[in-house]
Amino acid sequence: MNDRYLILPPSVEGIPDSYIVVRRFLSWVGVGALLFGIVFTLHFSNIEGLYEDDFYYYLVVARNFISGNGTSYFKGVLTNGYQPLWQFLVIAAAYGAEVSGWSPLRVVYVLSAAICLFSVVLVLRENRRLSDEGVLALVFCSGVVYLFLNMGMEVPALFFFSTILMLHVGRGGRSSSVIGFALFGCFLSRIDSMVYWLPMICLLLWGFKKHLMRSLLLLTTLVALYCLANKFFFGLWMPVSGLAKNAPVFSFHAQTFTSFLLSPRPPVFLMWSVLVTPVLFYLLPNKRLIIAVSFFLIFVFYVLHAFRSDYGVWPWYQYNFLLHILVIGLSEGAAGFAKKSGPGMRILLVATFLISVGMVFSKAVDQFKTRKQDSEMMAVGKFVADVALENGIDVLAMGDRAGAVGYATSASVVQLEGLVMDRGFLDRYASHLDLFDVLRKYKVGAYVATSPQPIPGEGCYLVTELVQAGDRAVRTRVCMPVLASHQSPSGLLTVVFRVPVVVQAGE
């Protein structure tokens, strides 16, 4: 057996029995922590609190598809998002919910968790074949995947295809078809993220240059076919959401940028720790230059986002940081370049295990603490549903909290961020249409604002919405009639505004 694998029979000279036992134990505990986190979430957490934001948009599309309206978001408007495989999963979950009587959200969570567990078990079965880096990837990814199940929709498919890639290369496979299709599956999991992690995969697999080039050629062909299909069905080469979200122009403000880099905020500490990581990897007994370069690419990615004038959205990009770590871990486990690891790698293995399991338990505790907040949002949803019913409102509009409202009301809910997926959004964006002019085009009868700020003496409110809603300004002055307001015990203020109907000439 090759001496690069440290999970060897106890009789092999130089490999302590205790280390083999610890290595196996860490692998199984990593999977156990993932399983515990999943069961804990299903039993103790408010599932609706996990699936707001983009998920509600995809669920609306799935319901429209099942009802025979095709892939539409609102009254037959063709639309598609940046997570094609996720959309198929939600459609399957919606069908399953009708058959089983479960909530679609629970079906989605169970399917997502099952895919991730299946992927982790596949890796665990190869435990005897993996280098220390492979076990490191398995243990760390157990925690990261659990966090993704609560943060990112695309993780089940991305983790599955990354695992296939890892196992194939880790077994010594060099099939360009398997690698190419696995990369294409990752591409369909979340299209825009591929720009970030594909260079890292190429670096980590650079030792197989010939097969890597063939795989990239196959990937390019498959992506081109996807673009042609998207152009045929939806009228654009890529989903409109990505074009809209990348529309803001990067700008550099020296004073803002400098003050941000020196500010004592968790995202800043995270960025600087990413910069230190390549140095630590390079100082290990086995110098991991490729890994160091990969982490440095993440640092460059973070710095580029810091150049944006709207750096207030920075904390959201911790999501992409976890995605990068997941891909690096899986790819490094697949590479299998390492010989026998020294004490540095063993220390890193144990430290990563402790961090990973700690992340799982801290997230579980956090979910338990936020149950009250999730319950408050469901109460807000019931309040908005009652207001819509009393006032005969058929269509509501709301921001990222639309999920909590949509699950509680029979009225149609237009999620503002979901508008970026609809055909024609870019034209509205380019013409600088006011937010409420956009809402009127969707026949919206009421606008629900979360945490609006009253303007003293004017009877108006200042609300903040995402730039994707239609207007470039994220802060909007609202002086429309107030139908009702609600304040939760924690102080969360929700105001329902009547959207006046403007009759156009000739109507």
Image: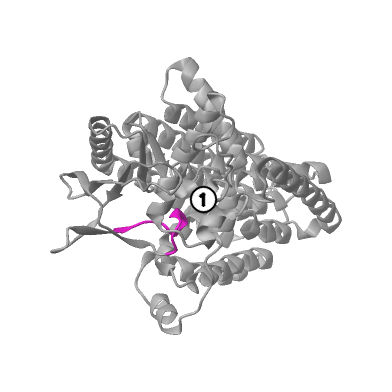
- Looking at the rendered image, the quarter that the C terminus falls into is top left
Give how far across and how far down residue 124 sits, in percent.
61, 37
Give the farthest residue toward the bottom.
255
Question: Is 420 positioned to the left or the right of 377 in the image?
Answer: right
Of residues 94 and 437, the one drawn nearer to the viewer in this rendering: 437
Q: How many marks?
A: 1
Q: What span is colored magenta in the figure?
A: 463-472
**What kind of residue is marked 1?**
Val
Q: Which residue occupies 40% across, 55% down?
A: 435
Rendered view: 381 above or below 448 = above
Give how far across and how far down residue 375 sits, in percent.
25, 37
Whether residue 461 can be seen here: yes
Of residues 365 and 139, the one drawn nearer to the viewer in this rendering: 365
Of residues 69 and 5, the one drawn nearer to the viewer in this rendering: 69
Rendered view: 458 above or below 76 = below
Rendered view: 358 above or below 473 = above
Q: Which residue is mark 1?
A: 420
Give how far across and how far down residue 380 sits, in percent.
25, 39
- Looking at the rendered image, the quarter that the N terminus falls into is top right
Give how far across and how far down residue 168 sits, in percent.
74, 42
Q: Which residue occupies 59% across, 71% down?
A: 283
Of residues 296 and 127, the one drawn nearer to the viewer in this rendering: 296
